[in-house]
Amino acid sequence: MPEHPTILIAPDSFKGSLSAAAVATAIGEALAPLLPQARLILLPLADGGEGTAAVLQTACGGSWHPVQVRGPLGDPVQTQVLKLRDPSVAVVELAQASGLFLCDRRDPLRTSTYGTGEMIRAALELESEELWVALGGSATVDGGAGLAQALGYRLLDQDGHAIAQGGGALLKLAHIEPPAKDLPLPAKVCGLCDVHAPLLGPTGAAQVFGPQKGATPDQVMILEQGLMLLAQIMQRDLGRDVIGIPGAGAAGGAGAGVGGDFWGQPWFRVVPQYKMLSVLIAS
């Protein structure tokens, strides 16, 4: 080892226990007395799940805006929307509102992304040039249906009644009506995730991620059928084809909501912290 080594500490969070920043700090504090001559660089990372907004705030600066929303099972949850200064971006972290860590019991037939939609609604009031939605760590497999309901979309059964929230209710979906008033969306909407999973199929939202959220094999099939019906009705009623979008299966299919069903095609943004990573590793 060089006499004065440089050590890059770049962890993700430890799900449900420590943030990425806390992990980086703990590792740094442990190494410092053992390697007093070393230069320690702390670079906490995120993958779109829990703690992503905090990592972005560390990388880019910005202000927090508290919002109370519905949690995945309907209980009130305190969340924070991040407003970055440069570039002008509002950041919504799905895990804060719809995360698995918020559930005492895992019930993907009932859990909903409605609270994430409420966060997005609050983020739109910040009038940023861009909206980033961090997709990961969800307790849900609802295809972003709850998110859409919170934004004013009406998901109706064959009798014209609103369906319940949760992935299990999607099998009753017959029609989707868009909001009466157009959403004040920024020019660019970005989904932040670390997977390219499609919405459906053996590598999709229900079959891969459903068991992680507590789905039994029978429930996985119910969720898969519900997501397929959702995709078909979105294409028929909204003209949105989400089946082939890479990343649509992220966060239990919420990637379909962010990537294609209501706002067009997905795109991705690399923040300065990540651009720095390859440079620091090379050095």
Image (spheres, rainbow, N blue to C red):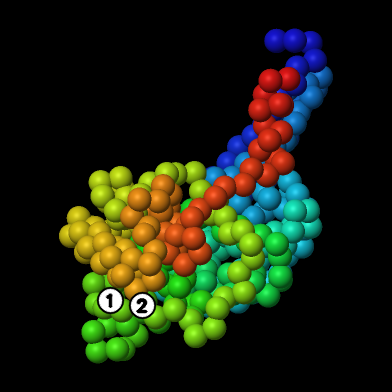
Residue pointed to by mark 1 = 173
The residue at the point 57 percent across, 47 percent down is 268
Rounded to the nearest angstrom, the CA distance separating label 1 from label 2 is 8 Å
Q: Secondary structure at mark 2?
A: strand
Between residues 18 and 156, which one lies in front from this camera angle?
156
Residue type at the position of mark 2: Ile
Within-10-Å neighbours for mark 2: few <14, some 14–19, many 20+: many
Residue type at the position of mark 1: Leu
The residue at the point 79 percent across, 57 percent down is 85
Residue pointed to by mark 2 = 176
Residue 13 in view in this figure: no
Figure check: 239 above or below 84: below
Quarter of the image with the C terminus in it? top right
In the rendered image, residue 160, in percent from the top left (x then y), is placed at: 29, 89
In the rendered image, residue 95, in percent from the top left (x then y), is placed at: 52, 60
Evaluate if marks 1 and 2 touch, with contact meaning CB atoms under 8 Å apart: yes
Quarter of the image with the N terminus in it? top right
Between residues 62 and 219, which one lies in front from this camera angle?
62
Figure check: 191 above or below 106: above
Judged left or right of residue 238, residue 136 is: right
